[in-house]
């Protein structure tokens, strides 16, 4: 991965087609502008090859400000594109966003989670191997197909945090104890939901946790396992007050 400074790209440099590279995660969002506040226009699955037409400075993500414009007319951040050890030098996007066809290069999209828009896509991406072995222990020391297992999966995959049942020296246990574990671990928890947060309640014998996918006013859309569908995926939009706290691991 090359973190490329905009100043290094001034001038026209011919770029050969790059080979396909290994992809570690599952998707990367492509925005209508070089900032995560813009609408998501495309979602590239892992392994998709995308045509990069030009580059532009935009919102800083993981200390990098370079964004690439794709053949679809939307923008992906440099840190989500895997180019191996090769340097790609597409032309600077012009002020009217016209791209330079002479400097196209083909690269492979690489989704690195932990970006601002961690809520999307809203879908059941829990590994099929876990679904077929409900009751077994997952890599994060939870029972598969439970709400805590799905939450731990999303924290690892989309927030890029190595979360386990003993994160930061605390025994997180079942869902009911997650809020207390977060406080002891110094993890922020409050009444404000945002995409990528963990919605928490201590209702029921074991409590419940869910992944916050979207926030609209006083409504929150969550994804979860083992709520209305025993040991299965579900999603719902409810009042944000339906949960007692929101745990922000990132």
Image (tube, rainbow, N blue to C red):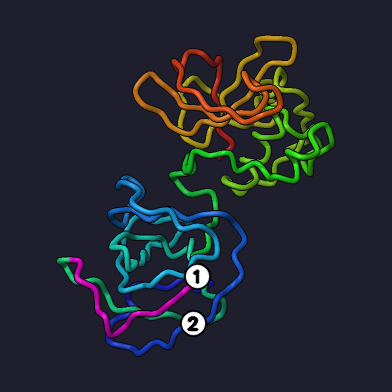
Which residue is denoted by mark 1 in the rendering? 108
Residue 142, position in %: x, y?
Answer: 79, 33
Q: Mark yes or no: residue 69 visible.
A: no
Q: How many residues crowd around disc 2 within 10 Å: few (fewer than 14), some, or many (20 or more)?
A: some
> Which quarter shows the C terminus?
top right
Image height check: is 201 above or below 57?
above
Image height check: is 116 above or below 201?
below
Name the residue nearer the viewer: 58 or 82: 82
Residue 84, position in %: x, y?
Answer: 56, 76
Q: Quadrant of residue 144?
A: top right
- Residue 143 highlighted magenta (yes or no): no
> Which quarter shows the N terminus?
bottom right
Give the spatial CA distance, label 2 vs label 1: 9 Å
Residue 118, position in %: x, y?
Answer: 49, 43
Q: How many residues crowd around disc 1 within 10 Å: few (fewer than 14), some, or many (20 or more)?
A: many
- Residue 100 highlighted magenta (yes or no): yes
The magenta segment is 97-107
Q: Are marks 2 and 1 in contact (CB under 8 Å)?
A: yes
Q: Residue furthest front?
A: 132
Q: Secondary structure at mark 2?
A: loop
Q: Secondary structure at mark 1?
A: strand
Taking the spot 54% from the left edge, 65% from the top edge, the residue there is 47
Q: Residue furthest top?
A: 204
Which residue is denoted by mark 2 in the rendering? 18
Taking the spot 45% from the left edge, 84% from the top edge, the residue there is 17
Q: Earlier in the sequence, mark 2 or mark 1?
A: 2
Q: Is residue 31 left or right of residue 127?
A: left
Q: Quadrant of residue 7?
A: bottom left
Q: Quadrant of residue 44?
A: bottom left
């Amino acid at each position: 991965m090359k973190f490329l400074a905009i100043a290094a790209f001034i001038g026209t440099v011919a770029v050969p087609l790059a080979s396909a590279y290994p992809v570690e995660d599952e998707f990367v969002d492509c925005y209508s502008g070089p900032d995560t506040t813009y609408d998501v226009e495309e979602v590239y699955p892992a392994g998709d090859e995308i045509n990069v037409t030009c580059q532009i400075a935009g919102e800083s993500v993981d200390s990098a400000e370079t964004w690439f414009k794709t053949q679809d007319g939307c923008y992906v951040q440099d840190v989500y594109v895997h180019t191996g050890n090769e340097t790609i030098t597409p032309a600077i996007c012009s002020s009217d966003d016209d791209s330079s066809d002479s400097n196209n290069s083909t690269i492979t999209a690489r989704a690195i989670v932990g970006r601002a828009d961690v809520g999307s896509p809203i879908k059941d991406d829990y590994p099929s191997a876990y679904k077929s072995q409900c009751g077994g222990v997952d890599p994060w020391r939870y029972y598969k197909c439970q709400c805590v297992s799905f939450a731990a999966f999303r924290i690892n995959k989309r927030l890029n945090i190595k979360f386990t049942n003993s994160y930061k020296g605390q025994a997180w246990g079942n869902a009911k104890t997650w809020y207390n574990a977060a406080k002891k671990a110094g993890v922020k928890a409050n009444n404000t939901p945002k995409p990528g947060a963990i919605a928490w309640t201590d209702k029921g014998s074991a409590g419940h946790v869910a992944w916050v996918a979207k926030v609209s006013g006083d409504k929150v859309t969550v994804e979860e396992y083992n709520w209305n569908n025993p040991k299965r995926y579900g999603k719902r939009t409810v009042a944000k007050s339906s949960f007692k706290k929101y745990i922000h691991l990132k």
